[in-house]
Each structure stands twice: as structure tokens, then as C-alpha cells.
Amino acid sequence: MCEAKYPLITQKRSDYELFKQAVELMKQKEHLTEEGLRKLVAIKASMNKGLSDELKLAFPDTHPVPRPVVENQEIKYPH
């Protein structure tokens, strides 16, 4: 992957990486199985505001996947 002109340097990068995982899972049609759907819900549990109350009720045993840590949050080109 090439470096973007304005890369994500905050925790939004973590959400982006999790979103990419979810898209890959769906591209491979894994979300059509029960296990794949549980993986997708676990990814959602780690993103933004987590699971809605409805999803928590539907998937009570969900464990969020670990969020990627964004280490370097320095603005490279401040101008």
C-alpha cells in the first residue's frame, strides 16, 4: 500500500483497519456462515460505538476483536 498524502493518524485508523477486515470477510462470503457472522459482529463490537442494544441481545456472547493500536500519531507535513 502506498502512503497517502493525508494518512489517518488518529484512532480513526484503527476503525479503518477493522472496516477493511470486515470487507475482506464479506468479499470471501464468510459472513454467510454462522461463524463468519459472529466474526463480523466481533469486529463491529470493536469499532466506533460498539454494538447496539439489539445486537448485544442477539449476540450476547460476543467478544470484541483487539483494536489495532496507532503508534505514530505525528503530523508529518504540518504545512
Image (cartoon, rainbow, N blue to C red):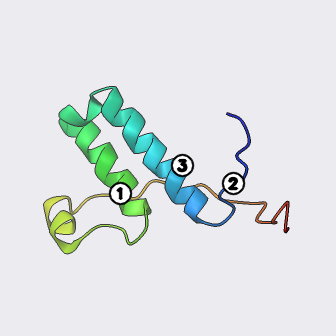
**Outermost residue toward the front?**
79
Sequence-wise, which precedes: disc 1 or disc 2? 2
Q: Amino acid at mark 3?
A: Glu
Tag 1 residue: 44
Sequence-wise, which precedes: disc 2 or disc 3? 2
The residue drawn where x is 28% and y is 37% is: 36
Specify whether residue 44 is in view: yes
Tag 2 residue: 7
Give how far across and how far down residue 60 sits, in percent.
21, 63
The answer for how far apart the CA atoms under marks 3 and 1 are is 12 Å
Horizontal side, residue 62 vs residue 77: left or right: left
Give how far across and how far down residue 56 sits, in percent.
21, 67
Give how far across and how far down residue 3 sits, in percent.
74, 42
The answer for how far apart the CA atoms under marks 1 and 2 are is 22 Å
Closer to the observer: label 1 or label 2?
A: 2
Tag 3's secondary structure?
Answer: helix
Tag 3 residue: 17
Classed neighbour count for the residue bearing mark 3: other residues with Cα under 10 Å, few (<14), some (14–19), many (≥20): some
